Image (cartoon, rainbow, N blue to C red):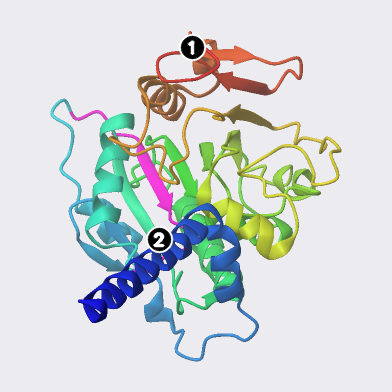
Amino acid sequence: MVFMRTILKSLVIVLVLLGAAGGYVWWNYDAVVTMILKPQTAAAGDITEESFGLVTADGKRFALGDLEGALASFTPSADGTPRPLVLFVHGFGPDPDGEFGLYTMGELAKGADADVIMFNWPSWISMTEFPVLNAKAASERLIVLLEKMAELRGPGLPLADRPVMIVGHSMAGEVFRHLAEATPDLPAVLVKRILFAVPETALPDHRLWMEKLGFADEIFVFVNADDPALQVTTRMYNTARLGRTLTNLDGSAEPLAQNANYILLDPESWRHYFFVSGQRSEAIDQIFADILKNGATALKNVYLRPEPASNVFVVVGPGAEGS
C-alpha cells in the first residue's frame, strides 16, 4: 500500500511538472522557438533552378521559365473576357505547394475572381534554419519572372488585357525587399497592386525599398500585432517586423512608404494565414477580397476606419475588438 502511494505521488509530481513545462512553452513559445530557429548563414548547397517553379491552384506544376504554359492551362472565362491574374508568393515553410498551399490559392481565386499562379521558391531548409539567403536567391528569379510578364503584355499576347495582382505572404516580404534593392528595370504599372500579408521583414527603413516598387500601381500592407510567427522573428532579430507593427521597439514611429496603404488588423486576428477562409472574421473576409479586386476604392469599406495618418486604416466590424 505504501509502495502504491509512493508511485501515485511520483506520478502526480511528473504530471504537474509536465503541465508546468507545457504551460511555459505555450506562454513563451516565441522564446522557445528562437532558441531552435536561427537565420541561415550559408547558401544551401542543394538549391538548383529546379528548386523554383510555378504552380496553379489545381496543382499543375511548371518550370519557372514556362509562364506561357502555366497561363495556357487556365480555362477561359465563359464570356471570353480576360480574367485577372494573381501571382502568389508564399512565405517560410515546408511543402508550400502542398494541400494547404493549393487551398490558399483556391481561396485567392475565389476572392479575386481570378486565375492564380504560385511562385514557388525553396522556403524550407530545416527546423533550425530560417532561409534568409534563399529569399535573396528567390528575388533574383522573381525579377526574371516579372520581366517575362512584361514581355507577354504586348498585343495578342497572353497578358495583353489581364490585370495582374500580387499577394506576398510573410517571408515574401524579404523576397520583395531584395527585389526592390536590386532596382530592376520593370515597366511602370506592370502590376495593378501588391498585397503584403503580414510581411516578415524589418520595419526600420522599409520605406526606402518599398518606394522603389514602381512597377506596382498600388501597395497594401496588412499588419497584425498578434501574429505568432512574427513574434518569433521579432525576438530572433531584436527588431520590429513590418507585418506586426508600425512602431519600433524603442517606441518611435517608423516613417511610412508614401506609395503604400497600411491595414491594421490588431486586435482582430492572431492567425498567420488571416486571409484564408476559416481563419478570419467577416470584416477581414470582406476587406481582403475587396482590396484584392478593387484596390484603393475598397478603403471606403465600412469595416475600415481611417487613422490620422492618411495611409493607415484600422479594421472594425464583426469580430474586431475595436468595433
Assign the magenta stretch its main secondary structure.
Answer: loop
Residue 76 percent coordinates (x, y): 17, 38
263 is within the stretch colored magenta? no
Q: Quadrant of residue 176?
A: bottom right
Q: Is residue 240 left or right of residue 262?
A: right
Q: Residues within 10 Å of mark 2 (few under 14, many from 20)?
A: few
Quarter holding the N terminus?
Answer: bottom left
Q: Is residue 198 left or right of residue 179?
A: left
Q: Is residue 197 visible?
A: yes
Q: Quadrant of residue 18?
A: bottom left
Q: Residue furthest front?
A: 1
Q: Amino acid at mark 2?
A: Gly
Which residue is disc 1 drawn over?
301
Residue 269 percent coordinates (x, y): 46, 33
At horizontal 31% and vertical 72% (from top left) the residue drawn is: 11
Q: Secondary structure at mark 2?
A: helix
Q: Is residue 126 above or below residue 263?
A: below
Q: Is residue 62 left or right of residue 257?
A: left
Which residue is disc 2 drawn over?
19
- Magenta region, residue range: 80-94
Q: Secondary structure at mark 1?
A: loop
Q: Is residue 177 above or below residue 288?
A: below
At horizontal 62% and vertical 59% (from top left) the residue drawn is: 233
Front-lying residue, 226 or 205: 226
At horizontal 62% and vertical 20% (from top left) the residue drawn is: 313
First in sequence: mark 2 or mark 1?
A: 2
* Mark 2 vs mark 1, CA separation in Å: 45 Å
Q: Residues within 10 Å of mark 1 (few under 14, many from 20)?
A: some
